[in-house]
Image: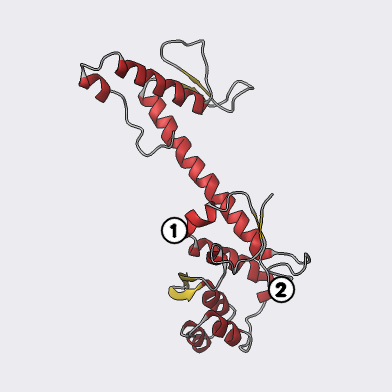
Amino acid sequence: MKAIDDFRDPNYSFLMNSHPSDVELDGQYYRTLEHAFQAAKTDDHDDRVKIKFAPSARKAKQIGRKIPIRPNWDNERVDVMRDLLKKKFEDEDLRCKLLATKDAQLISGGDKFWGMVQGQGENHLGKLLMDLRASIIQENSTTLDRACRDYLEACGWARDAGGDGMFGECWTPPWDEDCQYSLMDAVSEQRKLAMDSADSDDDDEDDIDDEPSIDHMPL
């Protein structure tokens, strides 16, 4: 498995907490995730303002190391980081870049809590990024599945949500009640049927238009 273990690489610098990206915390927007994370350490308004207007992520971190930390911070910091990462990667461009890392192992550097040093460490930041990537993939898959189901139902297919032991869910075409397909196989079969029908009836444009739309699906 490929490992991405240098977030300073220009190709992967978007993974760094210091990457410029507006991140919201308690109704206020911070110029980087690092700014927001350091501000989350305290409930003091003045300290948060100092961090918010720090000229760089490095400076925000320096301020964060000097201010009084709110109670129970050590137990909450991973959850705070998780929430801030979700907000950072609401940006469509950043989401696409994260997905482009595919199944690479993401390893942050710098310390042994958020990353790893010489192969040693807990790599919490890397793990959170990989968890977020997996959840985005699952979210996209769920959206695609919903569009497929709507499409098949519009074409007259019947769904057996319980499956048959082979497929998680089965789909039966309107022309053969004894034939069953998996979700994606059913979509492929219906699209093939539609294309064959269009090819055999090129002179009748209305027949082509009768095929229910499945816009924006990468089939």
Residue 212 placed where, x, y %? 32, 27
The figure's colour scheme reads: secondary structure
**Residue 4 in the image: above or below residue 190:** below
Question: Is 160 or 98 nearer to us in this picture?
Answer: 98
| Residue furthest front as drawn | 10
**Residue 138 in the image: above or below residue 116:** above
Left/right of residue 79 with respect to residue 204 in the rendered view: right
Residue 186 placed where, x, y %? 47, 23
Q: Is residue 157 visible?
A: no
Left/right of residue 45 with respect to residue 77 in the rendered view: left
Question: Is 55 or 149 nearer to us in this picture?
Answer: 55
Q: Amino acid under label 2?
A: Asp
Q: Is residue 153 visible?
A: yes
**Residue 141 in the image: above or below residue 32:** above
Identity of the residue drawn at 34% across and 36% down? 215
Residue 50 placed where, x, y %? 50, 88
Using the numbered discs, state the Cα–Cα distance from disc 1 to disc 2 in whole angstroms: 28 Å
Residue on which disc 1 sits: 93
Decide: few, some or many residues near mark 1? Use Cα within 10 Å; few <14, some 14-19, many ≥20. few
Q: Amino acid under label 1?
A: Asp
Identify the image quadrant of the C terminus. Answer: top left
Residue 5 placed where, x, y %? 66, 63
Describe the element under mark 1 as helix, strand or loop: helix
Describe the element under mark 2 as helix, strand or loop: loop
Left/right of residue 208 with respect to residue 4 in the rendered view: left
Identity of the residue drawn at 55% across and 75% down? 34
Identity of the residue drawn at 57% across and 25% down? 162
Residue on which disc 2 sits: 111
Left/right of residue 205 with respect to residue 19 in the rendered view: left
Dot placed on the residue nearer the N-terminal end, 1 or 2 = 1
Identity of the residue drawn at 70% across and 64% down? 123
